[in-house]
Amino acid sequence: MKSVVKLDIQAPRDAVALLFADPANNPKWMHDLDRCEPMAGTVGMPGSTYRMVPKKGDMVFVATVLSRDLPEKVKLLLDGRNLVVSITDRFRATSQGVTTMLSEEDFRFKGMFSRVFGFVAQR
């Protein structure tokens, strides 16, 4: 299942990309996320991993930074118990001080029940 999210942000592209690429900032814009816990590597850099711990529930993801081509693009892989999400975030300067962020997300469900649920959820 694929999803595309497009946002216009009232800030310069370089600043948006730097803030977005730092996992320590994730809880500031992901309201259901409690914290990110570093696991390996320099957090936010290619090859690094960190745990994304929710405020409620047990839907923990291990995030791996696949690439970081700032200020243009960041690629992540989120691996959870029943779900893997491949994410490519692109940043475009659209006008003076405005950045368009385009987030392409590819969801892959693990296990038969999760796959069936994912198929039904598409509709």
Image: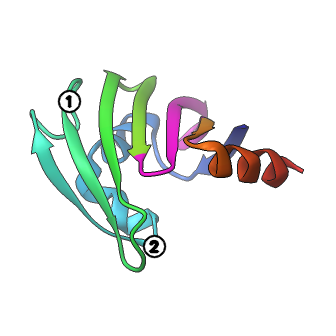
Residue 84 on image: x %, y %: 49, 39
| Residue 69 visible in the picture | no
Q: Secondary structure at mark 2?
A: loop
Indicate how the structure is coloured in the image: rainbow
Q: Tell me if 47 is positioned left or right of 57 in this view.
A: left
Between 111 and 93, the residue placed more toward the observer is 111
CB under 8 Å between discs 1 and 2: no
Region of the chain picked out in magenta, as a range: 80-105
| Crowd rating for badge 1 (residues with CA inside 10 Å; few <14, some 14–19, many 20+) | some
**Relative vertical location of residue 56 with respect to residue 48 in this rendering, above or below:** below
* Residue tagged 2: 32
**Relative vertical location of residue 93 with respect to residue 122 in this rendering, above or below:** above
Q: What residue do we see at 23% from left, 24% from top?
A: 46
Q: Is residue 94 magenta?
A: yes
Between 50 and 8, the residue placed more toward the observer is 50
Sequence order check, earlier mark of 1 and 2: 2
Q: Tell me if 51 is positioned left or right of 12 in this view.
A: left
| Crowd rating for badge 2 (residues with CA inside 10 Å; few <14, some 14–19, many 20+) | some
> Depth-wise, is mark 1 or mark 2 nearer the camera?
2
* Residue 33 sits in quarter: bottom left
Mostly what secondary structure, the magenta segment?
strand
| Residue 46 visible in the picture | yes
* Residue tagged 1: 45
Q: Tell me if 50 is positioned left or right of 105 in this view.
A: left
CA–CA distance between discs 1 and 2? 24 Å
Q: Is residue 49 magenta?
A: no
Q: What residue do we see at 52% from left, 39% from top?
A: 85
Kindly identify the amino acid type of the residue bearing the numbered disc 2: Asp
Kindly identify the amino acid type of the residue bearing the numbered disc 1: Met
